[in-house]
Image (cartoon, grey):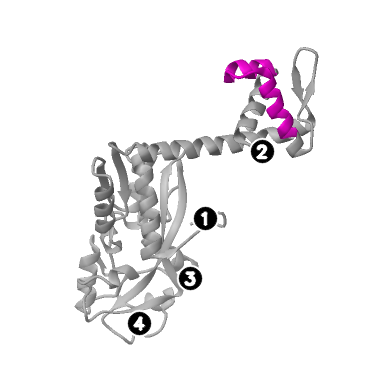
Amino acid sequence: MTLRQLLYFLGAADLGSFTAVAARMQVTQPAVAEQIRQLERFLKVDLFVRLGRGIRLTQSGEEFLPHARRVVAAAEEAQRSVAGMRALLGGTVTFGAFGAPAHYGFAALIRDFATAHPAVRLRLRGRNSSEIADAVRAGALEAALVVLPVNDDGIDVEPIARDEVLIVSSDPDLTRRPLSIEQLAKSPLVLYEAQYAEHDPTRRQLAERAQTAGIRLEFPFEVEHLDTALQLASASLATTYVPSAVTRSPVFPANLTTGSFDPPMYDVFAIITRRGTRVSPATGEFLRRVVRHMRGVAEPIRRDADDG
C-alpha cells in the first residue's frame, strides 16, 4: 500500500470516476485503475463497484475511507513539518513561561536555540501560569509552558514533566519526615505570588488539600516573590514551599532544610496552545526543544502513545 494509491483512492471516492482522477493528477486513466487494483489486491477486498459511466464505493470502501484520509493527512502534516524546519530562516517565537523558569535552566535553552537559529527572533513572556494561559487563549502568545492546574477553556494542554514541591524550614525537626496539610497548618506560613493569590497553581493545590482536610490555612506573611519567602524562612519567621529545582540554586539559603508533603505534592508542567490553531514553524521548533529540555531537568510525563 503506497501513498499514491491512497491519493488515487481518495480522488476516486470524491470524483466518482477514474478518468476525473487521471485528469486532476495529470496521469493516464489506466494508470489510476491499475493503482486502485493493486490497492484492492493488497487489502483483499473490492473498494469500488464499476458502473457503466462511473464508480461508487463498496461497503468495504466506505469503511476504508476515513482511515485513508487520516493516513494522507498525517503524511501531509509530516511534509509541512519538515518544510517548516527547512524554512527557519526568520520568524518570531512568541512563547510564555511560568514565573520561575530560570531555576530550570531556561537561559541555556534559549542560548542553544539562538545559536542554532540566529535569524529567528525570540519574544518570551514570563508571568504566573494563570495569566500566561489567558494570553495564549486570547492569541497574544502562540504557546506556553505552564504549571497546572490552569483554566483549559479554549486551549489544548499537554503535561510533559513534573517536579516535587518541598516544604522549606530552618527547623530540621519540622522537615525530618513528610508532613500532612494538617501538620503544616500548625506552623506559621509565608505564601508567595500574592498578586495572583488563589489563581496561582501551587497555592490552589494547597487550598484544595486544606479544604479536603476540613481546615483553613492561616498565614501571617504573604509576599510577591519566592526569594522573599525564602529569606523569611531563613530568618526562622515562617515555613514556606518551593519546587525541588529551587533548592539546587546557588542562592538557596544554606541554613534551610527541606521535606516532602504527605502525600507528595508536585508542580506539573504542561505545554499549552490555543485550541484549533497551528503554531508557526519557529515556535514549533522552540516547543520541541522546551519539551526535550524539561524532560531532562524534571521527571518526564509521557502519554502511552508518545514515542519520546
Q: Which residue is mark 3?
A: 213
Seen in the image, is 53 located left or right of residue 240?
right
Is residue 225 rendered magenta in the image?
Answer: no
Image vertical order of residue 267 relative to residue 38, above or below: below
Q: Secondary structure at mark 1?
A: loop
Q: Is residue 101 left or right of residue 263?
A: left
Q: Which residue is mark 2?
A: 1
- Judged by depth in the image, the label closer to the viewer, 4 or 1, is 1
Q: Which mark is residue 175?
A: 4
**Which residues are the magenta region?**
18-40
Residue at 39% x, 57% y: name it. Answer: 292
> What residue does disc 1 label?
307
Membership of 38 in magenta stretch: yes
Q: Quadrant of residue 40?
A: top right
Q: Given contact means CB atoms under 8 Å apart, are the residues at marks 4 and 3 in contact?
A: no
Question: What amino acid is labelled 1 in the image?
Answer: Asp
First along the sequence among labels 2 and 4: 2
